[in-house]
Amino acid sequence: MKVYLLFPQKRSQQEKLISIKNELIYQKKDHNRYCEKYAPKINDIYMVKSGATTGVTALVETDEVFNIWSPLAAFRCKDNYIPNYVLNFFRTAEYLNILALSWTFGTQQNIGMGILKNIHITCPPIDEAKEIAAHLHHHCLKLEETLTLALKQVTLLKERRTALISAAVTGKIDLRDWTPPSSSTEASLIAEEVTA
């Protein structure tokens, strides 16, 4: 059986924190010892508490066996709290500002468990919290889809630009009589650069 020890990751477009790709496989006896203090469960929330990504959060969404490294703080919600609501609350500008005001600095920022346990969160009635979490999840998925599509389009445009430049440089297309269209903002900027 593989047992994973996870480390905090750099921020990504989806703020994913936990990655089995960045794994350190360790022995089962060590895992059992680590689990005496804490054993991860689905819907636990992790927060980076040390380093450049302090305050970044993620939700456990896997049944895989793993444990966490000390730069992560683990939160487990009581029955009257909705994990996705709490996760999104942790990601608000207001909460992150409170964290930033509370962390200490050495060579990097750090937030202690004593401070984290004393920061209060606003929690509406459970039905309202579920509705808020579902609404945010739905809209975040839409934003992620839009972002993914935009990034693919940027990549495609860069490839086409490279191909066009290559074709022009190698003489496969003749641009001697080409003039930029007058309605194009980018074309007018290019024309200004050429005349400058």
Image (tube, grey):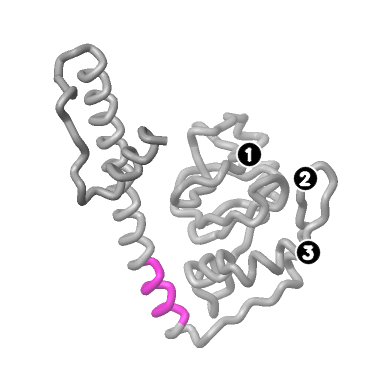
Q: Is residue 167 magenta?
A: no
The residue tagged 2 is 108
Residue 40: x, y in percent? 57, 52
Give, as a three-letter code, the residue at label 3.
Answer: Ser
Q: Is residue 22 above or below residue 98?
A: above
- Classify 10 Å Cα crowding around label 2: few (below 14), some (14-19), many (20 and above): few
Q: Please name the predominant secondary structure of the magenta segment in the image.
A: helix
Total tally of numbered discs in the picture = 3
Quarter occupied by the C terminus: top left
On screen, residue 77 above or below 7:
below
Residue at image location 56% in from the left, 36% down from the top? 4
Between the C-alphas of marks 3 and 2, the distance is 13 Å
In reply to whether residue 131 is colored magenta, the answer given is yes
Q: Earlier in the sequence, mark 1 or mark 2?
A: 1
Whole-percent x, y for residue 154 in the image: 31, 41
Q: Outermost residue, right direction?
A: 106
Q: Are marks 3 and 1 in contact (CB under 8 Å)?
A: no
Per the image, the residue denoted by label 1 is: 31
**Left or right of 135 on screen, residue 13:** right
Give the magenta part as a residue range.
129-137
